[in-house]
Image (cartoon, rainbow, N blue to C red):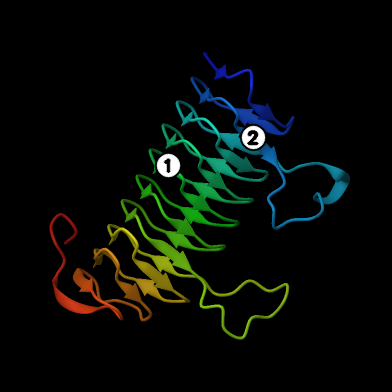
């Protein structure tokens, strides 16, 4: 078993690293996220686990209670919040921000902003942002979040707003703003987004 941890990385004692893991310079692993002010019960950080063969590049932050699968790649300056699950063979691109209690299934590619409690199913590509509606907010209560079904594509600078579902095989073009749930295997463009055609291959 080979584990490479750069000498400048800061790692809490709750972190479990799998085989052949690489941790780059200036990474911070296993501590509290900015949204949490107190440690969990018994005054201990919750475990952070990183699966076999995963690469974590420099200046990445991964908070307590999170699980990263096998053979993933987290590029430079990524942020992963607390109690998030990222499946196997996922790619988290440079500067991506994924917050608390997010579920990302296997073989996803993420480069945008992912709000608390979002769900992204397998084989999806999310270049845009998944955000809360921020309407009638109740302090201390998480808002309903977007759900992205399997094999979906969300283009650069697209925004998915509120408790809606991006259905299986949906293609959301760059810069689109989606405020309503989509139909499967359709192409959405515009502000607000609307159906233009069937989804581009290979998303049908």
Q: Quadrant of residue 164?
A: bottom left
Circle 2 — which element?
A: strand
The residue that disc 1 covers is: 94
Q: Residue at x 42, y 42 (%)?
A: 94
Residue 66 percent location from the top left of the image: 60, 45
What label sits on residue 6 in the rendered view?
A: none
- Residue 161 on image: x %, y %: 44, 74
Q: Residue at x 72, y 32 (%)?
A: 12
Q: Is residue 75 above or below residue 199?
A: above
Quadrant in which the C terminus appears: bottom left
Is residue 184 rendered to the left or right of residue 4?
left
Q: Label 2, label 1: how many angstroms apart (C-alpha)?
A: 16 Å
Q: Secondary structure at mark 1?
A: loop
Q: Is residue 71 above or below residue 169?
A: above
In x, y percent, where is residue 35? Answer: 70, 58
Q: Position of residue 146 (x, y in %)?
A: 45, 70
Q: Residue at x 64, y 22 (%)?
A: 8
The picture quadrant where one finds residue 28 is: top right
Question: Which residue of the protein is positioned furthest toward the bottom in this rendering?
Answer: 136
Query: Is 182 left, or right, of 10 in this rendering?
Result: left
Instruction: Tell me the residue at 68%/74% (across/down).
Output: 141
Q: Which residue reaches farthest top?
A: 1
Decide which of tag 2 and tag 1 comes sooner along the chain. Answer: 2
Q: Is residue 131 left or right of residue 199?
A: right
Q: Residue furthest toward the right? A: 42
Residue linked to disc 2: 28
Q: Is residue 91 above or below residue 83?
A: above
Q: From this view, report whether residue 113 is shown above or below residue 80.
A: below
How crowded pointer 1 is (Cα within 10 Å; few <14, some 14-19, many 20+) is rated as: some
How many marks are shown on the rendered structure? Answer: 2
């Amino acid at each position: 078993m080979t584990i490479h941890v750069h000498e400048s990385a800061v790692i809490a004692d709750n972190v479990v690293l799998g085989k052949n893991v690489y941790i780059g310079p200036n990474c911070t692993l296993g501590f509290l996220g900015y949204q949490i002010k107190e440690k969990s019960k018994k005054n201990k950080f919750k475990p952070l686990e990183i699966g076999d063969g995963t690469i974590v590049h420099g200046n990445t932050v991964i908070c307590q209670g999170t699980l990263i699968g096998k053979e993933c790649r987290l590029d430079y300056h990524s942020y992963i919040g607390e109690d998030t699950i990222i499946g196997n063979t996922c790619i988290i691109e440079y500067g991506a921000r994924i917050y608390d209690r997010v579920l990302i299934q296997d073989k996803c590619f993420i480069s945008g902003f992912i709000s608390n409690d979002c769900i992204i199913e397998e084989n999806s590509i999310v270049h845009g942002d998944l955000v809360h509606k921020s309407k009638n907010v109740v302090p201390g209560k998480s808002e309903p979040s977007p759900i992205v079904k399997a094999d979906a594509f969300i283009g650069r600078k697209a925004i998915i707003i509120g408790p809606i579902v991006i259905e299986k095989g949906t293609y959301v073009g760059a810069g689109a703003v989606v405020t309503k749930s989509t139909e499967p295997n359709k192409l959405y463009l515009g502000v607000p987004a609307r159906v233009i055609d069937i989804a581009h291959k290979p998303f049908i």
